[in-house]
Amino acid sequence: MEEAQLNWYALKVFYNKVFEMEDRLAGMGLETYLAVEKVPLKGEEHLAAARKLAQLPEGGRADSRLVREGPVIYRREPMVKSLIFVRADETDITQVAEMLKGPADLNKPEGFVYRTPDWQSFSVIPDRQMTLFMLVTSSGESGLKVFSADELTHFKSGQKVRVVEGPLKGAEGYIKRIQKNRRLLVAIEGIVAVATSYIPPQFMETVKE
């Protein structure tokens, strides 16, 4: 039997519940990606988080907002509070879309799956765009700035380049002038884009369209 095709999709999540949605999707056996910044905890915050993690029962699930790396505990903060990505086949993404509608008797949707401009189907994110977006947003680089699809219309198209050195090696996007600085912009078309901080020209090469 042929395996179902898996694709990446974007979900808009209401009420600042992306972490709860991340847990629910994981419970359905689905791969997810949430672009986050990791904020190191200090002082009382660190102690409270350490106690919380230490008190977990054997086999208990940790708070998905907390990440321990050696002695350091980080709090995950979403780069876009209402956006999460999921990799699913057509059957599963249809189930996710139904789940996001919420209980019919409450008429209180929890979000939606992004659709194509004609609204006829769910919008499939090309693997290449998703890979590049994950590369940049998970790099740990400082100075990243996220833009919505609507905000991108304010920036003129620039030269397409590839990063060949440094932590963002392999990233591809367009050079854009944003707030008077030239930045590399990596986009998931129609949904979101992330702009890097300054990258030295010698770390980049031109990519032919």
Image: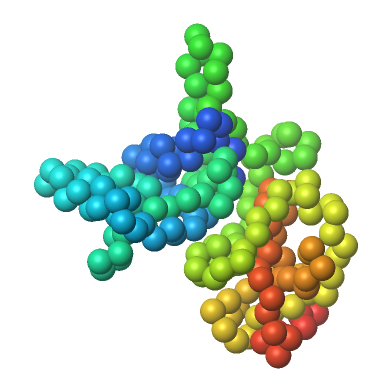
Residue at the spot 88% in from the left edge and 62% down from the top edge: 156
Q: Position of residue 24 (x, y in %)?
A: 39, 37
Q: Nearer the viewer, residue 114 or 176?
A: 176
Q: Tell me what residue is drawn at x 58 percent, y 76 percent.
A: 168
The residue lying toward the viewer, choosing from 89 and 129, is: 129
- Left or right: residue 48 versus residue 127 is left
Residue 185, image quadrant: bottom right
Q: Mark yes or no: residue 69 visible.
A: yes
Q: Residue furthest left?
A: 58
In this rendering, position of residue 20 left or right of residue 140: left
* Colour option used: rainbow
Which quadrant holds residue 57? top left
Where is residue 78 drawn, in percent x and y? 51, 49
- Hey, which residue is sitting farthest bottom in the picture? 202
The quadrant holding residue 14 is top right
Horizontal arrangement in the rendering, residue 185 relative to residue 154 (left or right): left
100, above or below 166, in the image: above
Q: Residue 190 versus residue 72: which sits nearer the camera?
A: 72
Residue 195 percent location from the top left of the image: 68, 64
